[in-house]
Image: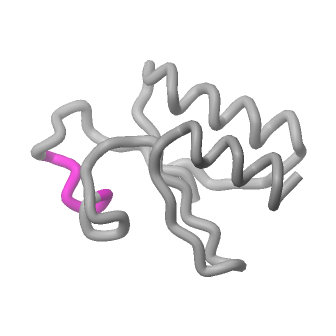
Amino acid sequence: MLYSLDGCPFCKKVEDALEANDIEYETRWVEGLHSKRNEVKRVSGQRAVPVLIDDDRGVTMAESANILEYVEKTLA
C-alpha cells in the first residue's frame, strides 16, 4: 500500500520506482491538507507522504529516499 498525494513529486518518484521494478501496489490517495491525513498519522506516526506499507514484511516507512532505497534493496 502506498499513501500518496496527487501532484506530489516525492510520491511520483516512489510510484515510478515501484512500477519500474514491476512491484504491484495499491495507492491510497490522501487529502491535500495535513490536518485531514489522520489515517496516514495512524499508520505511520506522521502526516507526510509518501508512506509505504509492506504487509508481507511488516514494514511501514516514510520519506521517499528511504522508500526508494527499500524498493531497490528489498523488493526489486
- Residue drawn at x 80%, y 37% is 19
Q: How is the image coloured?
A: one colour
Does residue 31 appear left or right of residue 71 in this picture? left
Q: In the displayed structure, would residue 1 be above or below residue 69? A: below
Q: How many numbered discs, if any?
A: 0
**Could you tell me residue 62's position as x and y percent?**
46, 51
The reply to whether the magenta stretch includes residue 74 is no
x, y percent for residue 57: 69, 78
Q: Which residue lies furthest to the left in this view?
A: 35
Image vertical order of residue 55 relative to residue 24, above or below: below
Query: Which residue is found at the position 61% from the left and 48% from the top?
Result: 67
Q: In which quarter of the image is residue 55?
A: bottom right
Q: Please tell me whether residue 61 is drawn above or below residue 4 in the rendered image.
A: below
Percent x, y of residue 11: 52, 32
Q: In which quarter of the image is residue 46?
A: bottom left
Q: Residue at the location (71% across, 79% down)?
A: 56
Give the vertical position of 50 relative to 42 (above or below).
Answer: above
Please state the horizontal and vertical placement of residue 66, each as a whole percent of the image.
58, 47
Based on the displayed image, in which of its 4 quarters is residue 41 positioned? bottom left
* 4 relative to 68 in the view: left or right: left
Q: Is the magenta stretch mostly helix, strand or loop?
A: helix
The N terminus is located in which quarter? bottom right
Residue 45 in the figure: left or right of residue 21: left
Asked if residue 39 is among those painted magenta in the image, a careful observer would answer yes
Residue at position x 17%, y 40% in the image: 34
Magenta residues span: 36-40
